[in-house]
Image (tube, rainbow, N blue to C red):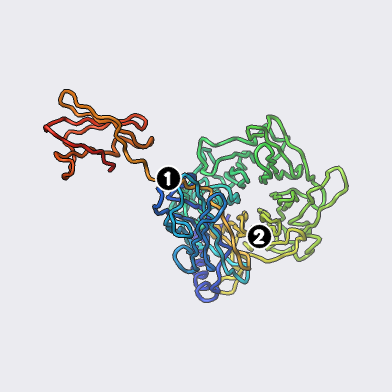
Amino acid sequence: MKSRYQRQRSLIIAGLALGLILATCVPSARANVYATNIKLNGELINATAAQGSEVSISYILNEPASAGVTINVLSNAVVVRTIDIAGDTDGAFTGLNTVTWDGKDADGSNVGPGAHYSVRITAASTGYDVWTTTSTDNLDGNLVWEGRGIGVNQNPKSPYYGRIFVANSHIDDVFGVNVPGDSVGMIKLNADGSFADEGAFSTGGHAWAGDFYSPWKLEVSADDYVYINDWTGSGEIYRWDQTLSTNSQLHVLRTDNWAPGCNMSGPAIFGTGPNTEIYMADIPYPNAQGIVKYSVTADGTCATNDIGKVVIPIAPPLSLYPYDIALDKHHNYYMIQYRANTTDAAPRVMRYPANYDINTNAVADWDTATLYGAAQQADDWNDAFGIAVDPTGTYVAVCFDGTADRGNTKILEAATGILVTNLDLDMDINGAGATHDDLDVCWDAVGNVYYIDDYSGVWRTVSPPGTNSSTTAAVVTLEVVGPPPAPAITSCSLAAGVFTMSFTAGASDTASAFEVFSCGTVNGTYGLASGANITESGGTFQATVPASAPVQFYRIHRK
């Protein structure tokens, strides 16, 4: 176990060094950028606005849109107004941006009432030349004391698109709890690393052990659920909604689902709803099963006493046990083995085809022992800890704890296993090998990779090279409401010194929206009628006024 004090000092020093490097070496280009948390008039789902009134359009950018932002306002998928924002101006910066739409179409006319409008936001970047870290280590949202799991919502139809979840498995027992990532549980963050609107932290109502294994790995499904492994409970899986609310907790995979002696790491989630498949890596040595598949029932849980089905057995190249599992969109399998000895020639990473059949002599598509041989027998290839495939199935990211603290995250070609680049395998300001322990990794929908560096106590975001343009269609819709109907007087009467006037108005109007004016002459100056009282019932209103003058004229006025 590393010194906590050493870890904190290394974070401070690394942050200073990174600041110096960024100030002198980083080009002016930006990262893979996209819009999330799109709100209309502050609403994520349903919003309203009066015809002709201004509408607030807000969104979060994970990085500056150096090549600008385009906002399309749509009615039934037809663009009625386009707002263009240049890079390096308001509306194109990292974090929360707010743009005002005047409620008019391209011809300058107010858009019609009764229709529902939506927005589509395209953010563009000129990109980096190489894989580049775009997050900042010393922000409160990036700090996590013992991070074990990380995941990002990749569902563009979700109001929580781009939300980041990080699991912390031990309390900060050196410096105390100073940021949300110091407590045992999960951090909830927006795409820019800011904290979620409803709160930065949640336990989900579960009693996590906080013993470095609970909570463990997590995955975000395509239908907006967060699956989290409690490895202290031999790998039991719990599921939550996107806010990790206590009442959404579901015990999906339980001890009655275990074969004798199993110990499950993972999960990987494939599919949605009743078609959800859960894949776990069974790791006990020497009796590991390999990769085990579970299916869920209609209520989202695994059936009682269903011990799953082994889909990838322990057989070369998977010769010891799998430590984590990922699937791409084509259902190909990617897995890692935790190999701690540099002389061990067994593969650290391997891919099996989607049509792999346990009953045949089929072999893996590729494995790192075949690809790299002795080259993988190195400190930076040891202790494989987590694996994830990008949404397009182009890259697989693997994080390594590393021997002698030479941890790093490697990007491989998913189809071939060829090494693309090493992340976090760098030098410190003195030219010596920097210390890193990378423990989990994931991707967002636009191709940024996220990993946890446990030595530094942070999670980071890295952008792939190249230009980028990503379009997000807002989930929220806006109903434009026309002007309310004018009040119409339907009857008047005078009895027992009280004048009574009935009138109609909008069905959604309330009595407080109106007031009674009076004057002694029809064309005179009207003022508030003393003692007036207005009641209403479903769009029908009644006003009563004490009749204190011989002749009096009355009007109903909308405030």
The quarter holding residue 424 reads bottom right
Most foreground residue, 119 or 198: 119
Three-letter residue code for mark 1: Val
**SS under mark 1:** strand
The answer to whether residue 281 is left or right of residue 116 is right
Image height check: is 463 above or below 499? below
Three-letter residue code for mark 2: Gly
The answer to whether residue 489 is left or right of residue 424 is left
- Badge 2 density bin: few <14, some 14–19, many ≥20, Cα 10 Å: many
Q: Quadrant of the N terminus?
A: bottom right
Q: Position of residue 253 (x, y in %)?
A: 65, 36
Q: Residue at x 16, y 35 (%)?
A: 552
Q: Position of residue 499 (x, y in %)?
A: 20, 29
The answer to whether residue 373 is left or right of residue 5 is right
Q: Quadrant of the C terminus?
A: top left
Q: Residue at x 77, y 41 (%)?
A: 310
- Badge 1 density bin: few <14, some 14–19, many ≥20, Cα 10 Å: some
Q: Check if mark 2's residue and mark 1's residue have beta carbons within 8 Å.
A: no
The quarter holding residue 407 reads bottom right
| Badge number at residue 384 | none
- Can you identify the residue that label 1 sits on? 481
Most foreground residue, 367 or 559: 559
| Whether residue 1 is visible | yes
Most foreground residue, 235 or 526: 526
Q: Residue at x 51, y 51 (%)?
A: 118
Mark before the other along the chain sequence, 2 or 1 = 2
Q: Residue at x 87, y 45 (%)?
A: 360
**SS under mark 2:** loop
- Can you identify the residue that label 2 sits on? 402
Q: Position of residue 180 (x, y in %)?
A: 47, 50
